[in-house]
Image (cartoon, rainbow, N blue to C red):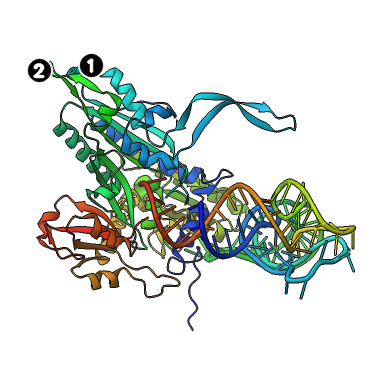
RNA sequence: CGGGGAGUGGCGCAGCUUGGCUAGCGCGGCUGCUUUGGGAGCAGCAGGUCGCAGGUUCAAAUCCUGUCUCCCCGACCA
């Protein structure tokens, strides 16, 4: 029996995908569970990813005319009650503040005191509190549009949590806009979804499908929910971002009214859209391998780590000087309009261990520099997307670093696109559907399924039949009618085009 | 919230069924020496109120009750 090569992460993706995911998060030092139920501590290496996600998206939001603002963490209970579907959707997962003080219980403990007149809800999302604020800001059509984004944390008391993918508290951005016309609001909804798609593909190297959610999967209170959906390496879908057209539902609930050009009092049209720290989970499950994290260069806070190899004490000074010089040279180079981020790892630990720690963290380039390289004026470079390391002249490496990073970024997207293509099928019969989404090994299910483009009549009953195999409709692609008419896989009734079915997170 | 699994030095685990000496092992940490180009070796040292709270008992990591947290599968959701 051939001995399998040692991997930095155990178990491997194939052996136990959920466990592998957790190990990658831990080994890459991205985050850890906290002492608070369901909440995570995002560690510097993970938070750096979030900061870069924020920076890139923030620029895209501003370039599309949006501004940032900040609204309260607390929402009066009565605000949340205003939109019926919205309350129903979120009521079960809210953290509720009922007291505003703690008192000594006489035994060294504390008991809540000072009961609030009206409970406050820790925001699960801010439509209602922002809507109430907008109602004050909007009088006339001249006050519109309002194009505001907020970077914030929200709390949803989820029953089952997983680092980055679903935590009780998470970081996100939520855009909330108000418009004069339905058409304008619809355009906004679509525009922001495009921003998300562009970001996912160009920065995260994570290909996404776009489309509209079915009624069953829609945001509570929305008229329509648009989404980006990505395929993870276990072939399950991850909803990576949503953009909601709220119609006049929230405007009516919050009394956002304006006097129109004709002097008539009208309800405004609103949208909301968001992405969260879940994107980091998506990045991990799209790119990480059995040796740990693989960070897309465009989102890496550091692109290169320099590892000095010092054999003899007397070499140390010279090798470090050579490394520092390399660091300075690289830092003057630009990748993606920013200076290349370089770490010189001087930690006094074994070289192998040091190298592997960076492999697991997913830094794009590792450069090892020892006396031999120094003498020949070269460096030894390892790319995170390849196994082999190669020697290269120092100047040549410095000059080509940016283009190597670009090549890596492009390669990651291509690989992810290829993976998705390999696991995307068209299915026309229920038996095929059942076969595609049923693992061979029921005890310990292997990666199976993928994206299945199938005909669907549009009724909730047939959608429910897919649920029996834990499969949901991820989205109805915008151009779904282009795939041609057919018959619903479940009931045989007419369908205008194929929609995307998959198992999901 | 339903089902299953688990909490024992920093990490991973054994011990628990059938209570009993100072609670073990591996990895890691520290110190010293030797090493160093893909996860080092030897020696010495440090480190644990066994998740928490009650209870049973002469005696509890072990038995009982409660509770908290984590992981997996479901339902729910970004």
Residue A262 is marked as: 2
Eyeballing the image, is B53 above or below A12? above
Residue A459, x across and y down, in percent: 20, 55
The x, y position of residue B30, in whole percent, is: 72, 51
Query: What subunit carries mark 1?
Result: A
Q: Quadrant of residue A80?
A: top left
Q: Which comes before the other along the chain, label 2 or label 1?
A: 1
Q: Residue at x 43, y 52 (%)?
A: A363
Q: Quadrant of residue A467?
A: bottom left
Q: In this rendering, do the residues under marks 2 and 1 share a single chain?
A: yes
Visible in this render: residue A339? no
SS for dot 1:
loop
Residue at 34 percent of width and 57 percent of height: A504
Neighbourhood count class around disc 2 (C-alpha, 10 Å): few under 14, some 14–19, many 20 upward: few
The answer to whether A235 is drawn above or below residue A442 in the figure is above
**Quarter of the image holding residue B58?**
bottom right
Task: From the viewer's perspective, tell me whether residue A136 is left or right of residue A325.
Answer: left
**Mark 1 highlights which residue?**
A139
Q: Nearer the viewer, residue A103 or A287?
A: A103
- Percent across and percent down for residue A51 are 41, 39
Residue drawn at (47%, 29%) of the image:
A120
Tell me if residue A67 can be seen: yes
**Which of the pair A250/A49 is nearer the observer?**
A250
Quadrant (top left/top right/bottom left/bottom right) for the C terminus of chain A: bottom left
Give the number of marks: 2
Could you tell whether A169 is left or right of A112 in the image?
A: left
Left or right for A58, reference A390: left
Chain label for disc 2: A
Q: Residues within 10 Å of mark 1 (few under 14, many from 20)?
A: some
- Where residue A413 sits in the image (x, y, percent)? 29, 55
Disc sitting over residue A24 in the figure: none
Tag 2's secondary structure?
Answer: loop
């Amino acid at each position: 029996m051939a001995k399998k090569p040692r991997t930095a992460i155990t178990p491997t993706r194939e052996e136990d995908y959920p466990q592998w995911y957790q190990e990658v998060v831990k080994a890459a030092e991205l985050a850890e569970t906290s002492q608070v139920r369901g909440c995570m501590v995002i560690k510097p290496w993970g938070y750096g990813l979030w900061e870069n996600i924020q920076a890139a998206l923030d620029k895209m939001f501003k370039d599309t005319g949006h501004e940032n603002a900040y609204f309260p963490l607390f929402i009066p209970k009565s605000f949340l009650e205003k939109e019926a579907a919205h309350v129903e959707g979120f009521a079960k997962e809210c953290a509720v503040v009922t007291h505003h003080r703690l008192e000594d219980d006489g035994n060294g403990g504390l008991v809540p005191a000072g009961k609030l007149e009206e409970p406050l809800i820790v925001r699960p999302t801010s439509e209602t509190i922002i809507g109430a604020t907008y109602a004050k800001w909007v009088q006339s059509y001249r006050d519109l549009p309002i194009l505001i984004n907020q970077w914030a944390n929200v709390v949803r008391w989820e029953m089952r949590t997983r680092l980055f993918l679903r935590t009780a508290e998470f970081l996100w951005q939520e855009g909330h806009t108000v418009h004069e016309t339905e058409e304008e609001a619809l355009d906004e909804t679509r525009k922001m979804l495009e921003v998300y798609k562009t970001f996912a593909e160009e920065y995260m190297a994570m290909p996404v499908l776009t489309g509209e959610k079915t009624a069953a999967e829609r945001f509570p209170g929305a008229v329509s929910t648009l989404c980006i959906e990505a395929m993870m390496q276990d072939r399950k879908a991850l909803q990576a971002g949503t953009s909601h057209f709220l119609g006049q539902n929230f405007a009516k609930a919050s009394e956002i009214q304006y006097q129109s050009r004709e002097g008539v009092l009208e309800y405004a049209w609103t949208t909301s859209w968001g992405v969260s720290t879940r994107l980091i989970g998506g990045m991990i499950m799209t790119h990480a391998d059995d040796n740990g994290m693989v960070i897309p260069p465009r989102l890496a806070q550091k692109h290169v780590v320099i590892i000095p190899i010092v054999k003899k004490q007397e070499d140390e000074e010279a090798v470090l000087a050579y490394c520092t010089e390399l660091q300075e040279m690289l830092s003057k180079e630009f990748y993606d309009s920013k200076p290349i981020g370089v770490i010189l790892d001087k930690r006094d630990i074994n070289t192998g261990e040091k190298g592997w720690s960076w492999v697991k963290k997913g830094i794009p380039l590792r450069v090892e520099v020892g006396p031999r390289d120094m003498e020949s004026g070269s460096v030894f470079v390892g790319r995170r997307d390849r196994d082999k390391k190669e020697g290269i002249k120092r100047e040549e490496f410095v000059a080509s670093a940016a283009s190597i990073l670009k090549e890596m970024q492009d390669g990651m997207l291509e690989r992810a696109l290829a993976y998705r293509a390999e696991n995307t099928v068209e299915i026309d019969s229920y038996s095929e559907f059942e076969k595609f989404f049923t693992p061979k090994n029921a005890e310990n299910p292997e990666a199976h399924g993928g994206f299945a483009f199938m005909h669907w009549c549009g009724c909730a009953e047939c959608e429910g039949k897919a649920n029996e195999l834990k499969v949901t409709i991820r989205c109805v692609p915008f151009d779904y009618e282009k795939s041609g008419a057919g018959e619903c896989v479940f009931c045989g009734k007419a369908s205008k085009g194929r929609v995307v079915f998959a198992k999901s997170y």
